[in-house]
Image: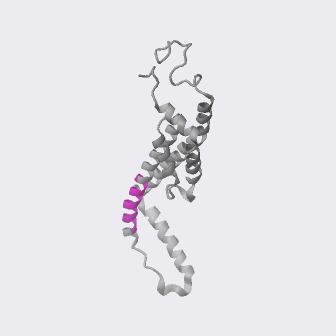
Amino acid sequence: MNDYGADSTEPAPGDFEDREAWFIVAQKRVATPGALLQLYAVIVVTLAAMYGGLSLVKPEVISDWAIDKLEEAQQGQGAQQQQQQKLPPRPQAAKQQQIEGTITSALAIASGVVIFIGGARMKELKSYGWAIAGSIVSIFPGLCCCCTGLIPGLWALLVLFNPDVKLAFTRNATPTAEQL
């Protein structure tokens, strides 16, 4: 007997020996984009946690760096001194960074979780909605630098809109007579 209570000679409900060839092709088609979504999600969550931790514990590090860069840019403008905007005081900027950085990182971590679940569900061919949601969320800029989420997000969407992949999600979600 196996984990499903069937004889070991019979394929278990999750095994793919009894599946048609198109289903196996669809499963292989979603494996790489799903894994790439999961990898991207881990990177997003890691960077967001580091940014949020730094914003919460030592916000002056980030705000001082940003103010220094703005001052350098303003000094390079020269003749346009009268049009420069005033920078906030450093303690006020640090407090603002503490609040905004923590909120931003919390949103990025939540987005990373959605992307990871979407990638996992995509690889399992279980929940089409989670897979689409994870793909779309990864496309949003601002989660990671330089719009790096476009590659896994668009690739996953292209694969998910394939008719064979849609059918595989549908067939995999429909319980068989043995599962009922």
Q: Nearer the viewer, residue 175 or 143?
A: 175
> Residue 93 falls in which quadrant of the image?
bottom left
Residue 120: x percent and y percent?
A: 50, 38
Q: Where 30 sits versus 47, above or below?
A: above
Residue appearing at x 49%, y 38% in the figure: 121
Q: Give the residues drawn in magenta, as a range.
A: 93-106
Whether 44 is among the magenta residues is no
Residue 110: x percent and y percent?
A: 42, 49
Residue 47: x percent and y percent?
A: 50, 51
Residue appearing at x 63%, y 29% in the figure: 21
Image quadrant for the C terminus?
top left
Q: Where 103 sits versus 126, above or below?
A: below
On screen, residue 21 versus residue 70, left or right, reads right
Q: Nearer the viewer, residue 164 or 66?
A: 164
Magenta stretch: dominant secondary structure = helix
Residue appearing at x 50%, y 12% in the figure: 1
Q: Where 130 sits versus 146, above or below?
A: above
Residue 22: x percent and y percent?
A: 61, 32
Whether 95 is among the magenta residues is yes
> Residue 162 falls in which quadrant of the image?
top right
